[in-house]
Amino acid sequence: MKKAIQHTSHAALGVVLAALAGSALAGAEFGANLELDNTARNGGAVAEGDKGLSQTGRIEVGVSAKAGDDMFVAAKTTLLTQKGGGVVTDDMWVQMGNKGGNVKLGRFEAADLFPLNADTLVNHAGTVYGTNSLRGRMGSDAFHGTGTINLTDTASLEVGYIDGTKNAVNTTNAKGLRAVLALGAGPWSGRVGFESGEYAPVGTADANKIKGWGFTTTYDAGSFKLTGNYSLGQQNAAANNRQTALGLSASVGALGLGFVNAVNDKAGGEVTVQTAYVAYAMSLFGVKGATWTPALSRSTAKDSTTGVTNDENALRVRVRYDF
């Protein structure tokens, strides 16, 4: 059965590639790239089966198109051919609207409220809440829609609803409302937003609540980019435990680095998660579109009630080629 599924998936990818070559999509934009991640992980926060050296990868094939002037319709689909076999959908959405606003439906990610620059490898030893629990890309049949109003040339309001609880089998499926206000002024940009919802209950358990707010701001001067994030809320916790997270990241040319500090309340104390990372992207033999990026990540999670500190150390070398 597994081989049949893989053959079907590869056949589907072939159909997409054949369509891209046809005149029906002559006005569409096509893109493809390959990423191969060679990763080593160790530490007390890493499961025994995940320790050591591993290699994962995928080929991303995407096509997008937009038609219309005053009123427009746009669409995008992105397929990932995985190193382990099979093809999965990363993005699949349709967008319709005008200069004043738009509606977007399908599988996608809404505005990011906790972005990190140069995040080739950022492995946390514990939970970090980033006001992104209801951001999107949830399940195969989850409903997701957003409506965006362009308030000015540099300000917009995005309001979305997602429901992935229809066939929930675990607490990764959720439903709820999310809103993000985006602003911009020269090299500065920022977003502030909130989310409110719940995870699907498992068996007779009560649904776990999601609620929180956060903001992010970025200064982008081209070769130098600095981003700061803050989030406050709770995620996947039946108890009303507060979670906070601060993030600061920067990229200077090909160098990227960042630091995240998160505090998760628990009965009688708290768990503090701290993560630092660095990455440096370099050309591979001077070939156009080919890069390799070594990256390091170090994270600790300290439980104040037990005095135990778990950690994760990770090293990755990513090889990427844009076709």
Image: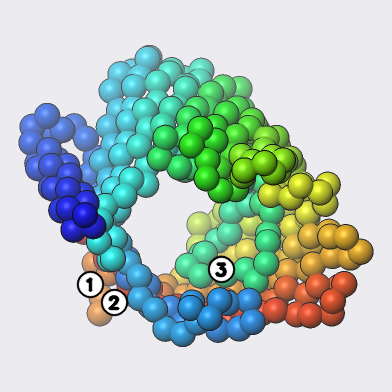
- The residue at which mark 2 appears reads as 284
Label whose residue precedes the other's in the sequence (2 or 3) = 3
Q: Nearer the viewer, residue 280 or 11?
A: 11
Q: Which residue appears at 34% of the width and 22% of the height?
A: 73
Q: Which mark is residue 122?
A: 3
**Residue type of the residue flagged with mark 1:** Val
Quick one: label 1 or label 3, which is nearer the N terminus? 3
Residue 286 as seen in the image, left or right of residue 158? left
Relative depth, front residue between 147 and 175: 175
Point out the frontmost of discs 1 and 3: 3
Residue 53's tag is none
Q: Disc 1 marks which residue?
A: 287
Looking at numbered disc 3 in the image, what kind of residue is underneath it?
Val
Instruction: Tell me what residue is drawn at x 63 percent, y 64 percent.
Output: 249
Q: Secondary structure at mark 3?
A: loop
Disc 1 to disc 3: CB gap under 8 Å: no
Q: Is residue 107 left or right of residue 110?
A: left
Q: Mark 2: which amino acid?
A: Leu
83 with respect to 299 (left or right): left
Which element is circle 2 on? loop
- Few, some or many C-alpha atoms within 10 Å of disc 2 (few <14, some 14-19, many ≥20)? some
Q: Tell me residue 310's x, y (percent).
A: 70, 79
| Residue contact at pointers 2 and 1, CB within 8 angstroms | yes
Q: How far apart are labels 2 and 3 at the CA level? A: 23 Å
CA separation, marks 1 and 3? Answer: 27 Å
Residue 186 seen anywhere in this rendered image of the structure: no
**Residue 103 x/y as whole percent:** 47, 22
Q: Nearer the viewer, mark 2 or mark 3?
A: 3
